[in-house]
Amino acid sequence: MAEFDLIIKNGMVVDGTGTPGQQADVAIVGDKIAAIGRLEGSVARKTIDATGKVVCPGFIDTHSHSDLLVLDQPYIDPKVRQGVTTEVIGQDGMSLAPVRDEYLSAWKKAMAGLEGSYDVDWDWRSVREYLDRIESMDLGPNFAFLAPHGNIRLTVMGLDNREPTPDELEKMQDLLSQCLREGAFGLSTGMIYPPCCYAKTYEFVALGKVLADAGAVFVTHQRSEADDILNSADEILKIGRESGCRVHFSHFKVAGKKNWSKIDPLFEKLDRARADGMTISFDQYPYVAGSTMLSVILPPWAHDGGTDRLLERLKDPVLREKMKKDIREGIPGWDNFVDFAGLDGIFVTFVKTEKNQDAIGKNLVELGEMRRKEPLDAAFDLLLEEENVVGMVDFYGTEEHVVRIMTRPEQNVSTDGIMGAKPHPRLYGTFPRILGKYVREEKVMSLETAIYKMTGKPASVLGLKDRGILKEGFFADVVIFDPQTVKDTADYVNPRQYPVGIEYVFVNGKMIVECGQPRPQRAGKVLRFSGR
C-alpha cells in the first residue's frame, strides 16, 4: 500500500496542458508529485478533500517586480494569496544585478523609482551573488531571474547616451553569457527606460545571438506601445529574425485611444512572423491601466546620465520648459504617457517621504490643484522632492482589447505588479480576475485554456522543464480553488485587497496558504537556467 505525505482527493484536476479536466486524486511526497489518479486505499499523513474544487499547477507570474521586495518580505503575500508559486523578476531591463560599485548609488535611485525604497544592504554585485542572497531568504514562491539589459549596459559602459564600441559590445555579450551561466533564464530590456533606450537595434541583435546559442529568451518592454507601436513591433521581430532567439513581449497592449485602430495590423505582423517560423509569445495583465515610475512622463533626453543628472535638469527652469514643450508636442518614436493617458488619467501610487503622502491616489490635475501649480510643474516638483521615487498608474486601454489580446495563442498571464501605498490592483487580483471575470462570468475562454495560460504556457516560454504541469515527477507547485467563488476584490479605489476562492497553495510540496489564509514558511527555491 502506497503511503504519501499528502493526498488531495476528489478534485477536478486541470493539469496545465489545456486538455479537459478530470476527477482525480493528487498525491505528493516531499517536493514532488508522486501520483495522479484514483488513489483509493492509499494512506497519507494529511488528506485534503477537494470535492467541488479545481486542483491545478501553481500560477507562474512571468512579469514580476519583486526584486527588492523579496529581500524585505520574502513570503510575497499579495502574490501567493492569489495562487502565484513562481515569480519571474529582472524585468524591463532594470534589476539589482549585475552592478558595479561606481554606479551603485545612481542605480539604487533608479530602482527605487521603479519598485520603491527598501532598507536593503546591496551586498552583491553579480547575478550569482544576488540569486544566492535571495536563496538565503525564507521564500514563499519560487524565483526565476532575467538578466537585465540595463544592468549589463551599465556595467560595461555606464549610463551615458551613446553607442558601444565594438569592444564594449563584445563585453556585453560576454557578460550576458556569464549571467546565463549563473542562472538567468534570458535577457530583459525596457526600451523606454535609461540606459536601455539608448541602444540601437544592432545591439539587441548581438545580444540575441547569445540567447539563441543558449536557448534562452529575449523579453522586452518594446520601444513603443502607443503612437509608434507598429514600427516598434517590427524592431522586435527583426531582433528575433536576425539573431534567431525566441522573443517575448512584456505587458502586450495598444496604448491611447488614437492608436486603438492599430491592433489589427499589429496582430497581422505577429501572424506573419509565426507563419515564417518565429517563436513569439507575450504576457498580459487583464486591466485597462498600467503602472510604472512617474518619471516616464519626461522626455528621454531628461534621463541621460542617470537619476542625479535628471534631478539637476528638473531644477533648471529653462530645461523644465523644454520638457513641457516636448510633452505637449511629442517626440517621434517616444511613448508620451501624458498624450495617451492624459493628465487626469495618471495617478500617483507611492512616494518616498512623509511630506508628499497627500499626493498618493491623486491624478496630475488634482495634484496641480492641491499644489496651486500647473499640473506638469506640480509633477516635476514631486519628482524632484522625492528624488524620483514616485510611482504611477496610467489609464490607456479598452476592455475589448483586453479580451482580444487575452485570447491570442501567444498570450500568457502576468501581473506586472509593483508594491506601493496605493498600488495597481493587478498586484493582488490578476489571476483570480481571469478565473472569475473572464472564465466564469464572461466565458471568454474555457477553464482549461485559462489555466494553461497561467501555468504550462509560461513554463514553456521560460524554459522550465519540471514545473507548470501537474505530472508525476514534477515539482509539487499546486493551487486548489473554488471555481464558483474565485474572484478578485482589489480595485483602483481599494487595491490592497486579497481575492476570494483561492483556498490552498503549495510550493515544492509545502503548504503556504491554507483555507485562504497565509501560512508563511520556507518553501520557494531560486530556479536557475540550465540551457537547452
Image (tube, helix red, strand yellow):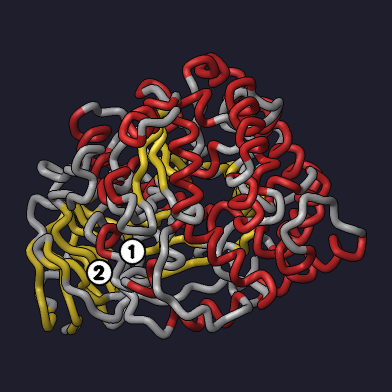
Q: In which quarter of the image is the C terminus?
A: bottom right
* Residue positioned 13% across, 67% down in the render: 514
Amino acid carrying label 1: it is: Thr
In screen coordinates, is 137 left or right of 307? left
Q: Are the residues tagged 1 and 2 within 8 Å (C-beta)?
A: yes
Q: Nearer the viewer, residue 479 or 137?
A: 137
Say which residue label 2 marks: 506
Q: Is residue 390 left or right of residue 461?
A: left
Considering every residue shown, the one lying at the far right of the view is: 166
Mark 2 burial class by Cα count in 10 Å: few <14, some 14-19, many 20+: many
Q: Residue 85 carries which label?
A: 1
User: Distance from label 1 to label 2 (Cα)?
Assistant: 8 Å
Left or right: 124 in relation to 79:
right
Residue at the spot x=79%, y=70% of the render?
174
Name the quadrant containing residue 467: bottom left
Which comes before the other along the chain, label 1 or label 2?
1
The local crowd at label 1, few if under 14, some if 14 to 19, many if 20 or more residues have their Cα within 10 Å, is many
Q: Can residue 417 be seen in this view?
A: yes
Q: Residue at x 17, y 43 (%)?
A: 489
The percent position of residue 196, horizontal first and vertical second, equals 68, 51
Q: What amino acid is labelled 2 in the image?
A: Phe
